[in-house]
Amino acid sequence: MVPEHCSWRSDADVASMNPCWCVMVALQSRWNVPFDGAFVNDGGAISWISRNSSKPGRPDELDCWTILSDRDWAASNLAMAGENVAEYLVAEMAKVYPVSMPTALFRQSHRWLYASARYPMANETGCAWDETMQLGACGDWFGKDNVEGAMLSGLALAGRVLGSANERAYQNHLTHLQFSRESLSQLTLKF
């Protein structure tokens, strides 16, 4: 997909992504845990849980949670049926905190094949830019694999594109000025 002569092609070829299973679950009533989001660092199947219904402006009739699987667990269970993944991860979420979890009324899973960078395209600029080809790339796979990382990478690339356009405009202006000086030197003034 990246042209052969692009300066950052070899870096892009090395970058690879991790999968993740995501589950949305709606509980019958509020799960009385003292948090609305938590990293789960126990080496199990879950890496993150968050209470979606705690976000401003969200309905609170049901207690809705998002569960993100651990990347290694996801890689080992890519072929598992989505219904089985949802059932398993909801059961694992119930073990995260020693408070009984209400009945799940709804659960749905989504397999996210390209969720986070295993080998990010790490560089100092947060994006890739080939000045000659005028071709760039950005995204959360430049190091910080979240929405903030994607936004910062996009802003970095926008800066590179705008800087390049500004430099080209400046060079065109200098060329035009040079042409104008040469034209002026060839004029003969007559009084």
Image (cartoon, grey):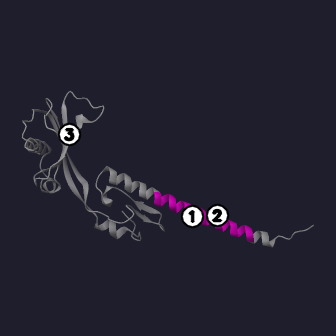
| Labels 2 and 1: the sequence-earlier one | 1
Q: Which mark is residue 36?
A: 3
| Labels 3 and 2: the sequence-earlier one | 3
Q: Measuring 9% from the left and 42% from the top, which residue is drawn there?
A: 97
Q: Nearer the viewer, residue 41 or 20?
A: 41
Q: Position of residue 113 (x, y in %)?
A: 23, 53
- Residue 31 sits in quarter: top left
Label 2, secondary structure: give it: helix
- Residue 182 sits in quarter: bottom right
Q: Residue furthest front?
A: 34
- Disc 2 crowd rating (10 Å Cα; few below 14, some 14-19, many 20+) is few
Label 1, secondary structure: give it: helix
| Labels 3 and 1: the sequence-earlier one | 3
Label 3, secondary structure: give it: loop
Q: Which mark is residue 168?
A: 1
For residue 86, side relative to residue 133 (left or right): left
Does 168 lie within the magenta span? Answer: yes
- Disc 3 crowd rating (10 Å Cα; few below 14, some 14-19, many 20+) is some
Q: Which residues are magenta?
A: 159-181
Q: Nearer the viewer, residue 92 or 110?
A: 92
Q: Which residue is mark 2?
A: 173
Q: Position of residue 101 (x, y in %)?
A: 9, 36
Mark 3 or 2: the one toward you = 3
In whole angstroms, how far apart are the C-alphas of marks 3 and 2?
56 Å
Q: Taken as a whole, is the magenta stretch helix, strand or loop?
A: helix
